[in-house]
Image (cartoon, rainbow, N blue to C red):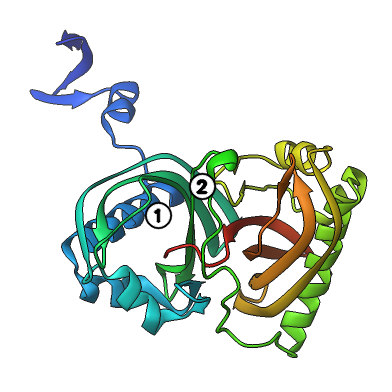
Amino acid sequence: MQVWVHGVSVLLTGGLLALSAPALAESMPAPRTVADDIGALEEQSYAAWKKGDAAVWSSHLSENFVGWGATGRIGKTEAVTALGGARCQIDGYKLSKMQITQLTADAALLTHRTEVEGACDGQALPAVSSTASIYVRESGAWKLAYRAQSEIVDPMKALKPADSDVWESGPTGDDDATQVLLTRETAVVTAWKDHDGARMAKLFGPEVQFIDIFGNHIGSRDEALKAWSGEGCEVSGFTFNGAKATMLGPDFGVLTYRAVYDAKCFGQDVWPIWGTAFYVKHGDDWLWSSGINVIAGAPE
């Protein structure tokens, strides 16, 4: 016999209550997704930063972590100190507008808007930034393998950091991985210089996110192609130095470098940047599959 209890269809079977199949399905929690798992880890990392819990960070980071510090590229050891929060007083934070792009089966990009109230080493932190985090699966667990932030600012009010020319991360690597990804990155940036959207389309992966030096977030491939092939920037030339590929899987690599441009965007000089590009191998080709640019010398 079927009856209704508080609007739910219930079967009476042998004196026992049994939910019907549709009601049972509705009562079951939805299975967790990669976005759920990574979003929760990102929240946990910020909670640990607020508490100054470096132990959490030691277990949270990939052994191959790469990111940006005060004078250039940093690895896991430096990141535990920089991100552990021991030198910081964080009064509050809020993460919003999260967007996940699963780049490979074992690598995912998370971007979000980050609002912070606090200071590190007595210096106020940027109030609002766009953040990019890369998570990779290692031994069945997701680990943070990259993080960088670009402060959200009005380009007309942005200030060039005093130490914009400082670089302590060495010369460009001569290993095969670095040379392959640097060649691809040079091709991508040259196509941007030439406003050649058709060429960029052949170099881009199927899914793309991008954060620029002013914290502007681009959330799709089409949006990126439209923005990068437009007429806002006039570029005469550029140079890369200090490039290094960090391979986080056979089909996924992170290229980090310092770039200097002879260029203006919307009438403003383009300052040196610390660039990051995420590359995914599709067949025999390494395709540009998201990135973030940070003003060189910007605070951690």
Q: Amino acid at mark 1?
A: Ile
Q: Secondary structure at mark 2?
A: strand
Work out whether residue 147 or residue 176 is closer to the camera in this orientation and state it: 147
Q: Gap between marks 2 and 1, in whole Å? A: 9 Å
Q: Quadrant of residue 278?
A: bottom right
Q: Considering only order in the chain, which callout, 1 or 2, is on the residue closer to the N terminus?
A: 1
Residue most toward the left? 15
Q: Residue at x 54, y 38 (%)?
A: 154
Q: Residue at x 82, y 59 (%)?
A: 188
Residue most toward the front? 162
Circles 2 and 1: CB atoms closer than 8 Å: yes
Query: Which quadrant of the rendered structure holds the C terminus?
Result: bottom left
Disc ID at residue 271: none
Query: Residue 18: percent from the left, percent from the top?
Result: 19, 26
Work out whether residue 167 or residue 181 is closer to the camera in this orientation and state it: 167
Query: Residue 124: percent from the left, percent from the top?
Result: 30, 55
- Classify 10 Å Cα crowding around label 2: few (below 14), some (14-19), many (20 and above): many
Work out whether residue 275 or residue 101 is closer to the camera in this orientation and state it: 275
Query: Residue 228: percent from the left, percent from the top?
Result: 78, 44
Residue most toward the bottom? 174
Query: Residue 3: percent from the left, percent from the top?
Result: 18, 9
Relative to 144, is 155 above or below? above
Horizontal side of residue 164 vs 176, given as left or right: left
User: Is residue 71 in sight in this rendering?
Assistant: yes
Q: Which residue is mark 2?
A: 100
Q: Which residue is mark 1?
A: 38
Q: Residue at x 70, y 87 (%)?
A: 173
- Classify 10 Å Cα crowding around label 1: few (below 14), some (14-19), many (20 and above): many
User: What number of labels is visible?
Assistant: 2
Q: Amino acid at mark 2?
A: Ile
Q: Secondary structure at mark 1?
A: helix
Horizontal side of residue 216 vs 264, given as left or right: left
